[in-house]
Amino acid sequence: MSSKKEHLLNLLSQEKINRDEFEKVCFQGIPDGCGIRSTCWKILLNYLPYERSDWEDVLSKQRGAYTQFIKTMIVDPNSAGDCQDHPLSSSPSSIWTGFFKENEVLSQIDKDVRRLCPDLSFFQQATRYPATFCSQSLRTRVEQANLQSMSVTSSKSGRSELKKPKKKYNDDDAYQILPQGQEAHWEVCERILFIFAQLNPGISYVQGMNEILGPIYYTFVTDNKEEEEFAEADAFFCFTGLMSEIKDNFIKILDFSQCGISHNMNQLMLLLQNCDPQLHDALVGRNIKPQFFSFRWITLLLSQDFLYPEIQRLWDSFFADPTRFQFLLHFCCAMLVAQRTRLITGDFIDNMKVLQRYTELETDIYQLLQLACQIRDGKVILRPVPVEEAPSGSGGLFNGLFRSRLR
């Protein structure tokens, strides 16, 4: 047994977990394949308390509450049994009024979750624990809504035909539908996001939230088979807790406030200016604005820029960061500095390719984590890059840097 795994298991076995020590160990990376990452994330995301004796009670109450959410919030109006209420009713209290309004949000969620991590077959596969007690499949509800939105047209021969509305995504993006009684993992994510939107009407659903939920749900399903049955409920509450901390990045009216995404992007550029003035000036001089690349990095916690195993390792550190996501900015800064030679010597087009297609670069996530810690601790020492120097190899990855251990 590895010393890190042994240390974590020892911490988790304590009646009251030492928070500082626990966060420190998790920050260094939670061991893969031993079924404890999901538990650690639940603690770090404030779903489970640091008092172990409270776990059973918390889990029982929250999982029961989520089941009730499904039963009360996903309702088929046809089963209401009120003959006075009907789809054409104009009454504000009509259940159909709310139903149609919900469908607008559900339609966007459906499009996004069908495209969730297309390179990973996991989300297309069937869950072992479908919500058979749910009165209505959201997938079926979306399909019915699409059918209702068809228009009747006449062909040249005079024959009436149903015309589908133009889709904003290709049919190839939609996952294969499973047999009746089965649910794909993307459908579970759809339900989680729909219930979140219903419970949080102020923010509702914003495109990109699916990319935040994906790694959490994937981890809870695959990490510990004994807890897989409760992955949906646990993922819902952890996602909700995480969104309570980062939701300001998704609220457009807060973009230019002290807590909005623009502030965070400016903080990233200030970090870069302090640790690598030459690279900062090169980007500014080429009019490469932070919103061109860092908007997605920060808002989605880099979930679209690395593979899922790498995201899990990154999120270990992000969730365990005592300054709560300040280390995310240090890591984003490290991503820039790691490609400094290429970015300093490249032109606008070359630089945009690097920054917007970071996943295509040959990068070592552990070296990036080391560099991020150096930036955080103010221990980065860089040598000037001659402007005539042409980019080569991996773009100057860690060229001229002193390395230190990840702490």
Image (cartoon, grey):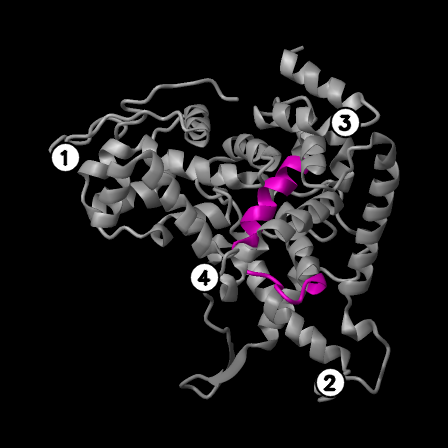
Magenta segment range? 198-220
Dot in front, 3 or 2: 3
Q: Earlier in the sequence, mark 1 or mark 3?
A: 3
- Crowding near the residue tagged with mark 2, few <14, some 14–19, many ≥20 C-alpha atoms within 10 Å: few
- Dot placed on the residue nearer the N-terminal end, 2 or 1: 2
Q: Marks 2 and 1, Cα distance to the nearest angstrom?
A: 66 Å
Disc 3 from disc 4: Cα separation:
39 Å
Residue 15 appears left or right of 203: right
- Classify mark 3: helix, strand or loop: loop
The question of residue 201 being in magenta is answered with yes
Q: Which mark is residue 17?
A: 3
Q: Residue at x 79, y 52 (%)?
A: 66
Q: In the shown orientation, is residue 261 left or right of residue 334? A: right
Q: Which residue is mark 4?
A: 256
Mark nearest the camera among 2 and 1 is 1
Do the numbered discs 2 and 1 sit on residues whose CB atoms are within 8 Å? no
Rendered location of residue 231, percent (x, y): 73, 41
Of the numbered discs 3 and 4, the one sitting upstream in the chain is 3
Amino acid type, callout 2: Pro
| Above or below, 16 relative to 354 | above
Residue beneath disc 1? 387
Crowding near pointer 3: few (<14 within 10 Å), some, many (20+)?
some
As displayed, is residue 314 above or below residue 370?
A: below
Residue drawn at x 74%, y 51% is: 181
Magenta: main secondary structure equals helix
Residue 163 percent location from the top left of the image: 49, 76
